[in-house]
Amino acid sequence: MTELPSFLCIECRTNPLPLDWCEAWGEYRGRLARLLHALKFERHDFLDDALASLLEETLRARGDLAFDAIAAVPMTRARERRRGYNQADLLGRALSARIGVPYGFSLLRRTPGVRATQSTLPKRDRAANVRGAFVAEGVEGKAVLLVDDICTTGETLRACATELRRAGASRVCAITVAKAG
């Protein structure tokens, strides 16, 4: 197993995510930010496999493919209907096909209720916005890889991972295409 250098931001050192590890392929800026914006808001769902190849590259460099299931960060049904798809779901499915780890569509879901879009909130309000926003089922004893497109403050990943652990996941790791700097 190839061990990547472990770099943690100050925030992650003082308030670590409940994850075994969290990786991002790149930094959310420039062309990568533009690609992710197109995937998310401009119906460029055809980018899913190309972006999943970046996630695969990151996993293989880390040397860790020991997962029982892949779960994507879910979005509200209303937002998914408006957008036409969940970009994290597309990435999770494409990554599943690439690495041969089953995709768990129903392992993690949003709870009903109106919540603000995370990107519209200041950092201080994001944790409260997603607290209790997710429920996990069918993960007891499983090693789960959590997939999302972007990690900004990490609060969505934190809420998902906390719920996966509460539901009995033996291990939870996360991978995103980009991390905000």
Image: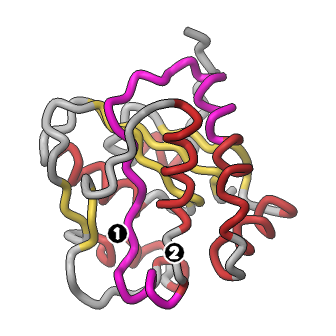
Does 45 appear above or below 140? below
Does 5 appear above or below 89? above
* In-image side of 24 versus 37 (left or right): left
Q: Quadrant of residue 170?
A: top left
* In-image side of 96 versus 29 (left or right): left
Kind of residue indicated by mark 1: Ala
Report which residue position mark 1 lands on: 127
Specify how the rendered protein is coloured: secondary structure
Q: Gap in Å between the C-alphas at discs 1 and 2? A: 24 Å
Q: Residues within 10 Å of mark 1 (few under 14, many from 20)?
A: some
Q: Position of residue 75 (x, y in %)?
A: 40, 73
Identify the residue at horizontal 54%, vertical 31% (top origin): 99
Q: Secondary structure at mark 1?
A: helix
Q: Is residue 65 inside the magenta stretch?
A: yes
Q: Secondary structure at mark 2?
A: loop
* In-image side of 58 versus 133 (left or right): right
Q: Position of residue 80 (x, y in %)?
A: 45, 81
Residue that lies at the very extreme toward the top in this rendered image: 1
Does 66 appear above or below 112? above
User: Considering only order in the chain, which callout, 2 or 1, is on the residue closer to the N terminus?
Assistant: 2
Q: Residues within 10 Å of mark 2 (few under 14, many from 20)?
A: some
Q: Which residues are magenta?
A: 55-82
Q: Position of residue 36 (x, y in %)?
A: 71, 66
Q: Nearer the viewer, residue 70 or 2?
A: 70
Report which residue position mark 2 lands on: 85
Q: Nearer the viewer, residue 159 or 144?
A: 144
Q: Quadrant of residue 43?
A: bottom right
